[in-house]
Image: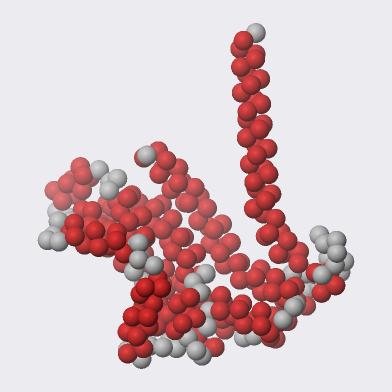
């Protein structure tokens, strides 16, 4: 009898947890679903009261209006170009820095790690003006290099990768060295292949952060030829005035690359989070 009561209590707790998670999922998905539906609505549907869930008439012209109001394709290309290059450079630099700090020994190593760790607590507003003056003195304002170069080094990405590099058994490193591998071959043949999931996760976080970057591209660009999507959406808001359905259409197109990247990296991300929990 006691066993049945325990089993019933156990099932009830599972049902309650499932119901709670479903409610949380609906709350998180609600803005996303509302955005997609609103992108096909007319102005009358957007401002109707009570609010309408489904459009009275599916209106795909909102998407074409985005391209007529602003050079959306140019902004799209700028975001893709700068984000991909920044992500590649950030991961490359972070992998080299993480390997150097974890598996190599050199003078000032501990001090450098402390400096990098401390830089994570410095807000961007503190470094914004000196960074702009430096970029301006190099004549990089209104250039792709001006957008990309100041953002290619991030302490967060480096320490994220370091935490996984540190999990590589030292015996594997020593065995590779006995086989005649130098530091670079140890990194490429042993360390990186065993931490591909972590590097993929770091790349995903880096891509998402760079894709939504707003403040620095806004400061460093005056020419619309170099503006990225977050800035373009701000100008679209000014152009479209109260046409929120057009803004929703632009927002849907803006998040498409993020969704595509997430679909391809979802397994790596979940696996990396699982392994993190196992290590802790």
Is residue 92 something one can see in this rendering? no
Image quarter of the N terminus: top right
Q: Residue at x 67, y 54 (%)?
A: 29
172 or 75, nearer to the observer = 75
200 or 240, nearer to the observer = 240
The vertical placement of 227 against 177, above or below, is below
- The way the protein has been coloured in the rendering is secondary structure
The vertical placement of 211 against 102, above or below, is below
Q: Image quarter for residue 275?
A: top left
Q: Residue at x 46, y 82 (%)?
A: 219
Is residue 39 something one can see in this rendering? yes
Residue 133 placement (x, y as % from top left): 34, 85
Q: Residue at x 62, y 86 (%)?
A: 71
Residue 17 placement (x, y as % from top left): 62, 35
Residue 140 placement (x, y as % from top left): 38, 88
Q: Image quarter for residue 10?
A: top right
Point out the residue furthest to the front here: 126
Left or right: 242 in relation to 252: right
């Amino acid at each position: 009898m006691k066993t049945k009561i325990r089993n019933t209590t156990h099932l009830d707790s599972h049902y309650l947890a499932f119901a709670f998670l479903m409610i949380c999922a609906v709350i998180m998905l609600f803005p996303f679903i509302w955005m997609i539906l609103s992108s096909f609505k007319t102005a009358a549907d957007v401002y109707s009261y009570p609010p309408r869930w489904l459009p009275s008439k599916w209106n795909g012209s909102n998407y074409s209006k985005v391209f007529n109001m602003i050079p959306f394709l140019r902004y799209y290309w700028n975001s893709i170009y700068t984000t991909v290059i920044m992500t590649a450079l950030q991961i490359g630099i972070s992998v080299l820095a993480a390997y150097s700090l974890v598996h190599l020994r050199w003078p000032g190593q501990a001090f450098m790690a402390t400096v990098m760790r401390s830089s994570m607590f410095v807000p961007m507003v503190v470094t914004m003006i000196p960074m702009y003056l430096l970029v301006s003195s190099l004549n990089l304002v209104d250039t792709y290099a001006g957008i990309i170069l100041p953002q290619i080094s991030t302490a967060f990405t480096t320490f994220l990768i370091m935490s996984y590099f540190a999990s590589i058994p030292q015996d594997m490193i020593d065995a590779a060295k006995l086989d005649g591998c130098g530091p670079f071959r140890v990194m490429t043949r042993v360390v990186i292949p065993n931490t591909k999931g972590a590097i993929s996760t770091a790349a995903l976080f880096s891509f998402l952060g760079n894709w939504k970057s707003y403040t620095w591209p806004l400061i460093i660009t005056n020419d619309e030829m170099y503006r990225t999507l977050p800035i373009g959406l701000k100008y679209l808001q000014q152009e479209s005035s109260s046409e929120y359905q057009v803004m929703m259409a632009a927002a849907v197109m803006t998040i498409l690359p993020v969704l595509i990247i997430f679909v391809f990296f979802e397994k790596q991300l979940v696996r990396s989070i699982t392994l993190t929990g196992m290590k802790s």
